[in-house]
Amino acid sequence: MFKRMAGLAAVVAAVVLAQGCVSMNSGNTVSVEVAKKPAMTFQLPDKWSSKVWRNKTILIPPSKYPHIQLWCLEGVPSVGKAKAKVAKLVKSEVIKYKVVKKNSIVVAGKPGLHLIGKGLEADDQDPSNAEVFLFEVSGKIFLLCVHGEGDEAAKNRKAALGILATVRKP
């Protein structure tokens, strides 16, 4: 399935997401709208692509692994409130998620959180490591989840932080 999607980075796509978010990409620039208003843009590294699936923007590295999803947390008022219920927020990807380390980050000039933890893959219950990034842009709270078996999430930490460093308000 991902082979079919690898060429999407060059195609402009817009899909209305279940939670009112819209994601569009053109080349390596991804734009996100919430409630029909621009919320943020960010840059993907070379050879990465993205697609929209259900209510999430899927970021696809050249290796096609690990799994990286971004979504808007409609109805969550702050990064702190998101942290308090992070296990529930990521259960579509990682179940029984437990945070083992917390780091402060800055995204688009605002404080955010980088949570490192463990759990089980939601689809097959294999042991999983997950890095969750919670941040606010344009008054909306977003979650970026990098997860996979073994140390795949940690191997992509630098790329995830690099993407987050390019997040801009529109």
Image: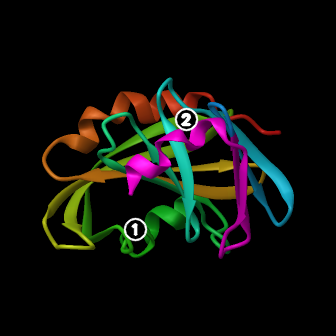
Determine crowd level at label 1: few under 14, some 14-19, many 20+ residues with C-alpha closer than 10 A: some
Q: Amino acid at mark 1?
A: Val
Q: How many marks?
A: 2
5 in magenta: yes
Asked if residue 105 lies left or right of residue 151, the reply is: right
66 in magenta: no
Task: Give the extent of the magenta segment.
Answer: 1-25
Q: Is residue 61 above or below residue 80?
A: above
Mark closest to the chain's N terminus, 2 or 1: 1
In terms of secondary structure, where does tag 2 sit?
helix
Name the residue nearer the viewer: 135 or 28.
Answer: 28
The percent coordinates of residue 52 (x first, y second) are 58, 59
Residue at which label 1 appears: 90
Which residue reaches farthest front?
A: 4
The percent coordinates of residue 95 (x first, y second) are 27, 73
- In percent of the image, x 39 and y 47: which residue is there? 3
Q: Amino acid at mark 2?
A: Leu
- In percent of the image, x 20 and y 65: which residue is there? 119
Residue at which label 2 appears: 164
Asked if residue 27 lies left or right of residue 49, the reply is: right
**Residue 145 shows up from this direction:** no
**Residue 109 shows up from this direction:** yes
The percent coordinates of residue 148 (x first, y second) are 24, 52
In terms of secondary structure, where does tag 1 sit?
loop
Name the residue nearer the viewer: 138 or 39.
Answer: 39
Which residue reaches farthest top?
A: 46
The answer to which quarter of the image holds residue 90 is: bottom left
- In percent of the image, x 39 and y 51: which residue is there? 2
Name the residue nearer the viewer: 115 or 167.
Answer: 167
- In the picture, the quarter occupied by the N terminus is bottom left
